[in-house]
Amino acid sequence: MKPSTLFSVFIIAEENEAVKELSSGLALMGFACAIASREEIVRQVVESATDLVLVEIDGRSANSRLELSRRIREERHLPIIALVSRERLSDLDDDLNIDDFVITPCDVPELTLRIKRLLRKPSNRRSGELINCGNLVIDMGKCAVSIKGKSVALTFKEYELLKFMASNRGRVFTREVLLNKVWGYDYYGGDRTVDVHIRRLRSKIEGSSHIFIETVRNIGYRFK
């Protein structure tokens, strides 16, 4: 009997037989896997329900893959494990964008254990790392959001906006204050940016049965 899916894993690597076997092995262990090697995948990873990223660091692609890891981290704080050949271990020295690594060819049971250790269940985390708002859960340790246990794919700024508002429930914030708190004082975009992100955020976390963000006319927004 196939185990139920534990987490979603994105593999950045050339889609060769070894990587396909790795993906199949992880799938048998209960992980949902996707494989891609194109640079456009950064946006795909950021906006998907991915829980963890595996990055192959080998050959001529090593430097570009490390750059991909950096770009992913800038947008969304996902755990990243490097799949690295012994010859390229030095490439990981002091790289803060990599949380862990395994030597290729990978041992699936070892990799599974490393993934599970990085993706500890919220019940095993300190309560201070969770914000619970009814069916909405913000896991600040994983930078992840879920509704009724189902992952919600947010961009980095959507996540930061939601976390800030949910941490200050009931308070009304003007667009200017939200710009300063989430985007920073050196951000030169207009307050229209806030409206766009609020609209996108609402489309992802709200429905007919749950409304979280309230518009306060002529002032701004508050998290109910």
Image (cartoon, rainbow, N blue to C red):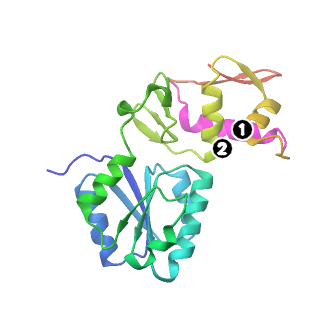
Picture coordinates of residue 111, whole percent (x, y): 31, 59
Label placed on residue 182: 1
Residue 202, quarter of the rendered image = top right
Tag 1 secondary structure: helix
Lateral position of residue 35 relative to residue 43, left or right? left
Prevalent SS, magenta region: helix
Q: Nearer the viewer, residue 83 or 182?
A: 83
Q: Is residue 92 above or below residue 218?
A: below
Picture coordinates of residue 89, whole percent (x, y): 44, 72
Lateral position of residue 176 relative to residue 31, left or right? right
How many other residues sit within 10 Å of disc 2, few (<14), some (14-19) or many (≥20)?
Answer: some
Lateral position of residue 122 relative to residue 131, left or right? left
Residue located beneath label 2 in the image: 157
Q: In the displayed image of the protein, which residue is found farthest to the top?
A: 170
Q: Is residue 214 above or below residue 87?
A: above
Picture coordinates of residue 54, whole percent (x, y): 42, 62
Give the residue displayed 36% in from the left and 41% down from the top. Answer: 120
Q: Which residues are magenta?
A: 190-209
Q: Nearer the viewer, residue 148 or 13?
A: 13
Q: Nearer the viewer, residue 191 or 65?
A: 65
The answer to whether the residue labelled 1 contacts the one labelled 2, judged by CB atoms less than 8 Å apart, is: yes
Quadrant where the C terminus is found in the figure: top right
Q: In the displayed image of the protein, which residue is found farthest to the bottom?
A: 60
Give the residue displayed 29% in from the left and 55% down from the top. Answer: 112
* Residue 153 falls within the magenta-colored stretch: no
Give the residue displayed 63% in from the left and 20% down from the top. Answer: 169
